[in-house]
Image (tube, rainbow, N blue to C red):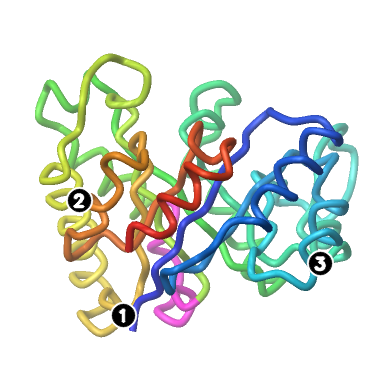
Amino acid sequence: MRKNIVAGNWKMNNDLAQTEELITELKNQTKTSNAEVMIAPTFTNLWHSFESLRQDDIEVVAQNMHFAENGAYTGEISASMLKSIGIKTVILGHSERRAYFNETDESLAKKVDAALAHKMRTIFCFGEELADRKAGNEEAVVGGQIKNALFHLGADAFKSIVLAYEPVWAIGTGETASPEQAQDMHAFIRKTLADKYGKDVADTVSILYGGSVKPANAQEIFSKPDVDGGLIGGAALNAEDFYAIVNAF
């Protein structure tokens, strides 16, 4: 049985006071769905957020990590460091990490390996750019990102992997992705997994949609058979909007 998941990626937003305020507002929201709820604050606020939500039904996750255990990697954070403060899930391969920090399929494969070695759950992100979509290459690009970074793994590894499809072309570009386009790509992603690992494995992996999900469109998107939740950006910074999305299931 696949899990429904709504994860809020706060990106580089919210200082400590703002984080405390938003967490308080999140605690005051009512959840009516069975979806797992996650938030990903900035590194400086992970420990405080974890402590604040220790008794609540909201998991605190990290936005990134390095593949090395330790060493001369100024400014980086390792899996063991995250585990030491209670973090058990990490987002890897976000489109902004790929675009702005030159993360590649090869480096992401190492990060996934490191996370799995530390028994961390991974939310693995991928998606095509506008030029790819206009050229009709979206399936080749998405399939390649998945295969290059994940297909060296055994089937059991996918018990600890959540996939997140981000149509980069539909985020902040003025272009709009329809719920049908989301479903079509999610179905392709699941078939790609099934072709490699079998239908039983593919049917257990949650696939999240990261294409500007908002309260107004969440219910329609989440109603699609292969969409198991969302990786939420801007709307996650507003507690009421975020929980409207959570409750869209």
Going by the numbered disc 1, the residue's amino acid type is Val
Which of the two residues, 69 or 99, is positioned nearer the viewer here?
99
Membership of 75 in magenta stretch: no
Q: Nearer the viewer, mark 2 or mark 3?
A: 2
The crowding category of the residue bearing disc 2, from other C-alpha atoms within 10 Å (few below 14, some 14 to 19, many at least 20), is: some
Quadrant, the N terminus: bottom left
- Tell which circle, 2 or 3, labels the residue nearer the N-terminal end: 3
Going by the numbered disc 3, the residue's amino acid type is Gly
Q: Nearer the viewer, mark 1 or mark 2?
A: 2
Q: Based on the displayed image, in which of its 4 quarters is residue 174 positioned?
A: top left
Left or right: where 217 falls relative to 161 = left
- Tell which circle, 1 or 2, labels the residue nearer the N-terminal end: 1
Assign a secondary structure to mark 3: loop
Which of the two residues, 4 or 143, is positioned nearer the viewer here?
4
The crowding category of the residue bearing disc 3, from other C-alpha atoms within 10 Å (few below 14, some 14 to 19, many at least 20), is: some
Residues tagged 3 and 1 counted as in contact (Cβ below 8 A):
no
What's the distance in space between the residues labelled 2 and 3, CA to CA?
Answer: 34 Å
Looking at the rendered structure, which numbered label has been put on residue 47?
A: none
Residue labelled with disc 1: 201
Looking at the rendered structure, which numbered label has been put on residue 86?
A: 3
Residue at the extreme top of the image, as rendered: 174
What's the distance in space between the residues labelled 1 and 2, CA to CA?
Answer: 26 Å
Left or right: where 81 falls relative to 166 = right
The residue sitting at 45% across, 63% down in the picture is 5
Assign a secondary structure to mark 1: helix
- Tell which circle, 3 or 1, labels the residue nearer the N-terminal end: 3
The crowding category of the residue bearing disc 1, from other C-alpha atoms within 10 Å (few below 14, some 14 to 19, many at least 20), is: some
Indicate whether 70 appears above or below 150.
above
Residue labelled with disc 2: 220
**What residue range appears in magenta?**
149-159
Indicate whether 68 appears above or below 175.
below
Assign a secondary structure to mark 2: helix
